[in-house]
Amino acid sequence: MTDKTYDVVVIGEGITGLTAACRAARQGRSVASCEAELFGGLVININELEGSPATEHASGVELASTLMQENAEAGVQSINERVVGIAADGALLQVRTEGTTHLARAVIVASGARLKRLGIPGEAEFDHRGVSQCADCDGPMFKDEEVVVVGGGDSALQEALVLARFCRKVHLLHRGPGFRARRHFVDRVNASDRIAVQWNTVAEEITGGQCVEKVRVRNAADGTRSEIPCAGFFAYIGLAPNSEYLPAAIARDANGAVLTDGSLKTALDGVWAAGAVRAGYSGLLTDAVKEAETAVASALTRLK
Ligand SMILES: Cc1cc2nc3c(=O)[nH]c(=O)nc-3n(C[C@H](O)[C@H](O)[C@H](O)COP(=O)(O)OP(=O)(O)OC[C@H]3O[C@@H](n4cnc5c(N)ncnc54)[C@H](O)[C@@H]3O)c2cc1C
């Protein structure tokens, strides 16, 4: 157990957690942020952010690195440890990591979310052999090839547009009859001569030899089956909240997203939640920043 008690411990160093930690430290509070992997979270592999909260930063790496630097200057203690549990300890909270236990007067849960997988045959088998979820990192590997993208929201269309810069053809499969994505993404997809949209289409299996060679699909409207020859497969079908490590006292919805009140307080006293881990989060970085600010303001009121 650490002998230090922090005013605020923030879980996660994505854009929400980094913003929350910085705001609390700038109020003169002792703050630690715990990160299981690399700081930055979901944006780290996005080269061109839409609606970045800091307009001068085009890429996710630049945005996250700038926030990390600001946090170091503000005195935030960055701890590279995965949080495995939270428990009440009198008036304090224990934040348990794989290595130690940190004590906090308030905790802000900003552990975000991860991209869901389809769970179809071949998806795990061909991971890193054609199956990817990072268009910016892996797109150049598919130069002049054909790839399949699955999904109908902002992420799927945004990443299909990234892949269209490299690939000869992007087959964009959507299980429904229309996109959920924002208008400007839809307009750009419709204008691309390299993106072919297939409505009412479900990916059923990924096949190949050493690498991905085909995706078997079913038309949900008429039940017919066909194959798409391709070298790459990218699924953007939504996010699963990183909330499994939280205690039952922190209420969640059916998807695992943390439930909060309007001040972003959770059902466990002393614990707030913000960003992609939270039920009702819009998915926009500008709102991640606003939620971080709301949670900090509410948490610091309790510390007065
Ligand atoms: C492909 C894609 C493209 C996108 N493009 C845009 C865009 O252009 N513009 C835009 O506004 N939004 C975009 N988004 C959405 C945006 O990325 C997210 O809304 C935002 O990054 C969420 O930030 P977050 O900090 O809440 O969560 P995350 O980014 O998920 O960060 C959570 C952090 O917590 C860490 N963590 C998880 N569990 C633990 C644990 N137990 N202990 C310690 N640390 C933990 C994770 O490792 C991670 O670093 C995009 C999303 C995707 C998937």
Image (cartoon, rainbow, N blue to C red):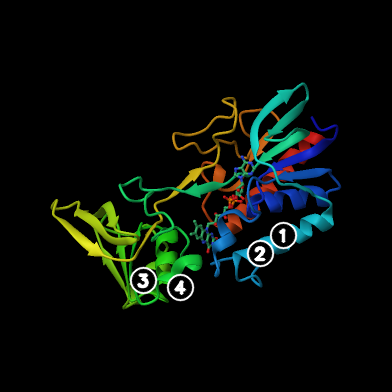
CB-based contact (under 8 Å), mark 3 and mark 4: no
Determine the secondary structure under disc 2.
helix
Q: Marks 2 and 3, Cα distance to the nearest angstrom?
A: 26 Å
- Mark 2 or mark 3: which is in front? 2
> According to the image, label 1 marks what residue?
67
Q: Is residue 244 left or right of residue 182?
A: right
Q: CA distance from mark 4 to mark 1?
A: 28 Å
- Residue behind mark 4: 140
Contact, CB < 8 Å: mark 4 with mark 1? no
Mark 1 lies on a secondary structure that is helix
Quadrant in which the C terminus appears:
top right
Tell whether label 1 touches label 2 (CB within 8 Å): yes
> Is 255 drawn above or below residue 121 in the view shown?
above
Which one is earlier in the sequence, the residue at label 4 or at label 1?
Answer: 1
How many other residues sit within 10 Å of disc 3, few (<14), some (14-19) or many (≥20)?
Answer: many
Q: Which residue is mark 2?
A: 63
Q: Which callout, 2 or 4, points at the residue further toward the start of the chain? A: 2
The residue depicted at 63 percent of the width and 52 percent of the height is: 14
- At label 2, counting other C-alpha atoms closer than 10 Å, the crowd grade (few under 14, some 14-19, many 20 or more) is many
Q: Helix, strand, or loop for circle 4? A: helix
Q: Is residue 212 left or right of residue 73?
A: left
Mark 3: C-beta under 8 Å from nearest atom of ligand 1 = no
Sequence-wise, the earlier of marks 2 and 3 is: 2
- Residue marked by disc 3: 189
Please tell me in which quadrant of the rendered image residue 224 appears.
bottom left
Three-letter amino acid code at disc 3? Val
Mark 3 and mark 4: span between their CA atoms?
A: 19 Å
**Amino acid type of the residue tagged 2 in the rendering:** Leu
**Quadrant of image for the N terminus:** top right
Q: Is mark 2 within 8 Å of ligand 1?
A: no
Q: Identify residue type, mark 1.
A: Leu
